[in-house]
Amino acid sequence: MKKIALVTGATAGIGRATAMILAKNDYDVIITGRRKDRLDETEQNIRNNSQADVLALTFDVRKYEDVSKILGGLSGKWARIDLLVNNAGLASGLNKIHEGDLEDWEKMIDTNIKGLLYVTRIIAPAMVERKSGHIINIGSIAGVEVYENGNVYCATKHAVDALNKGMRIDLVEHNIKVTSINPGAAKTEFSLVRFHGDQEKADRVYDGFIPLFEDDIAEAVLFAATRPPHVNINEILIMPTAQANTVKTARK
Ligand code: NDP
Ligand code: 8X3
């Protein structure tokens, strides 16, 4: 029987690449996101380029009622999720704490922390019952360090780091693996979303150096997911060669 992976936020970037690489490596995949047209594109792309079966589910991870109805209502083979990749997330805004926009703050907290919790709360019990499963949380270098104006985004990713460690303690006796993949700057739609659609500002983030790309992170997810049963990858911090940390990047 093929393994089943659920990847949240698969309409773009890291989630999209992760769903694709898992599909090419013997997983059937459940993909999720809010933008139905983009999810349909991802589904078609996976079907065209792999042997995987795909289930596309459109919902907002911030809405617990939808998360619980849609994910809690999975049936047949789709109810047996072997791998959960908690990827859906975003940065919104880049402001001093005293100038922060409450809507931005709530978006980040509700998506990056509460959304991840909502999905995990629905999926983890069946893993516990089966005494098998793997949860991979997409954290960030922003969960390891804090940088100027990154305040609330960094706080949410520090929360993901704490949850990752907490999940591992709570789930270890149930034979469930928990991994955090923490990327540095990766060129996806991340900066476009952070700067509310300002493409020029988004592009400037990656000026003068080679950032990570979505496939680089997807490969790290696949590596963690394919270790033997007795091996858990606790965390991977993966950076562009040109980025030493959140404050020092070698730009040409
Ligand atoms: P993208 O903006 O390219 O992709 C984000 C994905 O998350 C999209 O599929 C989006 O789908 C989904 N998403 C966002 N909000 C919601 C929501 N409320 N409900 C459901 N899905 C949602 O960014 P990345 O691929 O870069 O980001 C993926 C993860 O990686 C995030 O957790 C991010 O914090 C993390 N990360 C990114 C880094 C980077 O430099 N790019 C570095 C470190 C970590 P849709 O809009 O269709 O709902
Ligand atoms: C994304 C990486 O450094 O832009 O999580 O916050 S960073």
Image (cartoon, grey):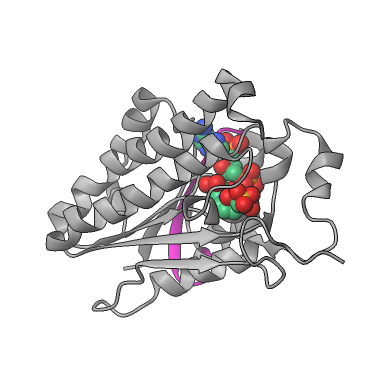
Q: Position of residue 71 (x, y in %)?
A: 34, 38
> Residue 21 placed where, x, y %?
55, 66
Residue 232 on the magenta segment: no
Q: Is residue 181 above or below residue 99?
A: below
Q: Position of residue 108 (x, y in %)?
A: 52, 32
Task: Give the residue drawn at x 60%, y 23%.
Answer: 98
Along the viewing direction, whichever of 144 and 235 lies nearer the viewer: 144
Task: Give the residue at x 47% y 55%.
Answer: 144
* Quadrant where the C terminus is found in the figure: bottom right
Q: Is residue 43 visible?
A: no
Region in magenta = 23-35
Q: Is residue 57 above or below residue 229?
A: above
Position of 34 with respect to 30 (left or right) is: right
How far from the left and from the top, in percent, is residue 195? 73, 34
Q: Nearer the viewer, residue 41 or 170?
A: 170
Residue 29 shows up from this direction: yes
